Each structure stands twice: as structure tokens, then as C-alpha cells.
Amino acid sequence: MAEKKLSPELFRHRWVHSFEEDSAQAQVYRRQSWDFPLSHRPREAFELRSDGTAQLFLPGAEDRPQAADASWTEEEGELVIRAAKKGARGPSRFRIIESAADKLVVRRS
């Protein structure tokens, strides 16, 4: 079976975790422009660039997002994001289950 190419749409936006929409099997990410409900819980996010680099936005001091350099690859149908700094917290492997212009549904491993 041929591997599915990543959609160019992935590289055009910052993808923010919409944890209110998560299920036991998957996590949902929405474009940054989505109308997210207010939350006391900080939201993780990521941006991918077509050159294989990425940025993670993770809760830092006072729960404000802090950018962390990262890289990404596609391995066996999974999007793998690796933080450049050892020990940095953040997403590691995503299997994209559903991809639309404004929504990503991923299984995280």
C-alpha cells in the first residue's frame, strides 16, 4: 500500500490542541484561528515547515506558551516530531487519522 503524502495544508497553520474534542482513541488539533472556548488549562501547539523543521509551543512559566525548536519526519505513515532540546516535553509521534482544512485528528503514541 502506498504511503499517503502529508497535505500541504499542514504547513500553512499553527495547530492547537483542542482537548475538549478529544476521545479515548484520538486527539484533535485545530487551526490557531479556531474559536476555542476559554480554558484555564494551557494548550499545546505545533507548526510544521516544509523543510523538515518545526516549532512546538508548550506551556512554560506561568503557563504561557514557549516556543521550542523541533524537526519532523514521516515514518511508516506516522508524523514524528522531535524536539531539538533533549528532555523537552512535547508531542513525539502522531498518526493522522483524519485531516481537513481546519481539523486534524491524530492518534498519539
Image (tube, rainbow, N blue to C red):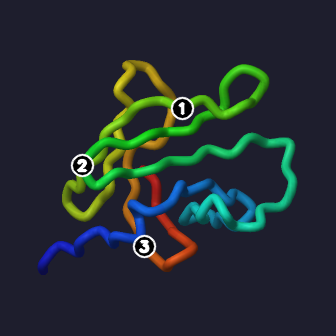
Task: Tell me the distance, in whole angstroms, between the alpha carbons under discs 3 and 1.
Answer: 26 Å
Left or right of residue 34: residue 85: left
Identify the residue at horizontal 49%, vertical 79% (top origin).
100
60 to 100, vertically: above or below: above
Left or right of residue 15: residue 47: left
Q: Which residue is mark 2?
A: 51
Q: Which residue is mark 1?
A: 67
Label 1: few (<14), some (14–19) or many (≥20) C-alpha neighbours in 10 Å: some
Instruction: Say what amino acid the circle numbered 1 marks.
Output: Ala
Marked residue nearer the N-terminal end (3 or 1): 1
- Indicate which label's residue lies in the foreground, 3 or 2: 2
Q: Secondary structure at mark 3?
A: strand
Marked residue nearer the N-terminal end (1 or 2): 2
Left or right of residue 41: residue 101: left
Label 3: few (<14), some (14–19) or many (≥20) C-alpha neighbours in 10 Å: few
Q: Secondary structure at mark 1?
A: strand
Tell me where residue 69 appears, x and y as whole percent.
Answer: 41, 31
47 to 12, vertically: above or below: above
- Indicate which label's residue lies in the foreground, 3 or 1: 1
Say whether marks 3 and 2 touch (CB < 8 Å).
no
Tell me where residue 42 appears, x and y as whole percent.
Answer: 74, 41
- Quadrant hosting residue 102: bottom right
Q: Which residue is mark 3?
A: 97
Tell me where residue 11 appears, x and y as whole percent.
Answer: 39, 60
